[in-house]
Image (cartoon, rainbow, N blue to C red):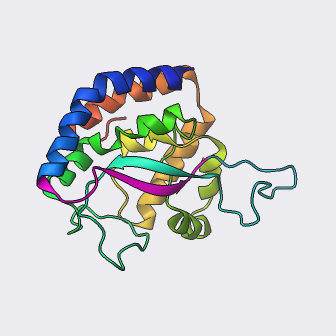
């Protein structure tokens, strides 16, 4: 109920900002306003430990995530799933601003209303990257015990991932959140998200 209420109110309040973002994107960069990508979500497992909804274990239920586009439109051959670094040449000037302020995440309120994400939770990853990290990072898949979120403990305390060591730190923060998950903890993280967006840095 908290997720639905916050997402619905958030969409109403953010509508003017989202409209401005959409207009600026269209005026400054050719391509679609929204960026859609498959991510790995909540893991639904049978009692035997296998994923009972598909033959191939993807680590969780795949879903389509929505974001404002922060990069130039993909060129042929650029569909490979890789991390975007802060100096990635594909990121547009306005896209860099959206990423630093986290405003590119606003369309994910739609994912929350669809029941694919929570407001607070571990960030969902792309399937191919997820598969690699599951083999490299201890307990990585344990993050899928809860729905992925727009914001989370890792997002308000740490910066964007640039290497596997960064992922390990975020996994520890995600697991810490899962162990202490509660209504009050979610409200605390939501309250700390606004300062992170405004001042562009993590805050514990």
Classify 21 as above or below 142.
Answer: above
Residue located at (60% from left, 64% from top): 134
Report whether 129 appears left or right of 25: right
**Residue 197 falls left or right of residue 174:** left
Q: Please say if 49 is above or below 148.
A: below
Quick one: quadrant of the C terminus? top left
Q: Return the residue nearer the eye: 64 or 88.
A: 64
Report the magenta residues as a range: 28-41
Q: Position of residue 17 (x, y in %)?
A: 22, 31
Which residue is rendered at x = 34% and y = 32% of the image? 193
The spot of residue 22 in percent (x, y) is 22, 42
Tell whether 47 sits left or right of 69.
right
How many marks do you count on the picture? Answer: 0
Examine the structure image and report whether residue 40 is included in the region drawn in magenta.
Answer: yes
Residue 138 placed where, x, y %?
61, 61
Residue drawn at 36 percent across, 27 percent down: 11
Q: Is residue 21 visible?
A: yes
Quarter of the rendering containing residue 15: top left
**Is 197 on the left or on the right of 135, as rendered?**
left
**Which residue in the rendered view is the most extreme toward the bottom?**
77
Residue 152 showing in the rendered view: no
Quadrant of the snapshot with the N terminus: top right
Residue placed farthest to the right in the image? 48
Q: Name the one closer to the observer, 121 or 14.
A: 14
Residue 176 lies in what quarter of the image?
top right
Location of residue 161 (image quadrant) = bottom left
Image: 160 above or below 5: below
Q: Is residue 18 magenta?
A: no
In the image, 203 versus 61, the foreground residue is 61
């Amino acid at each position: 109920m908290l997720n639905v209420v916050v997402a619905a109110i958030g969409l109403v309040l953010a509508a003017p900002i989202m409209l401005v973002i959409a207009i600026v994107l269209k005026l400054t960069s050719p391509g679609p306003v929204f960026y859609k990508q498959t991510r790995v979500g909540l893991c639904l497992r049978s009692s035997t430990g296998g994923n009972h909804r598909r033959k191939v274990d993807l680590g969780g239920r795949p879903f389509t995530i929505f974001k404002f586009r922060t990069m130039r439109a993909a060129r042929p051959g650029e569909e490979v799933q890789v991390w975007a670094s802060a100096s990635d040449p594909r990121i547009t000037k306005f896209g860099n601003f959206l990423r630093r302020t986290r405003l590119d995440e606003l369309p994910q309120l739609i994912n929350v209303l669809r029941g694919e994400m929570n407001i607070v939770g571990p960030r969902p990853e792309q399937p191919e990257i997820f598969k690699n990290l599951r083999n490299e990072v201890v307990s990585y898949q344990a993050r899928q015990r809860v729905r992925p979120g727009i914001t989370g403990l890792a997002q308000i305390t740490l910066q964007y991932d640039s290497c596997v060591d960064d992922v390990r730190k975020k996994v520890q923060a995600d697991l810490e959140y899962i162990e202490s998950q509660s209504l009050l903890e979610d409200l605390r993280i939501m309250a700390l998200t606004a300062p992170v967006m405004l001042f562009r840095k993590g805050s514990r």
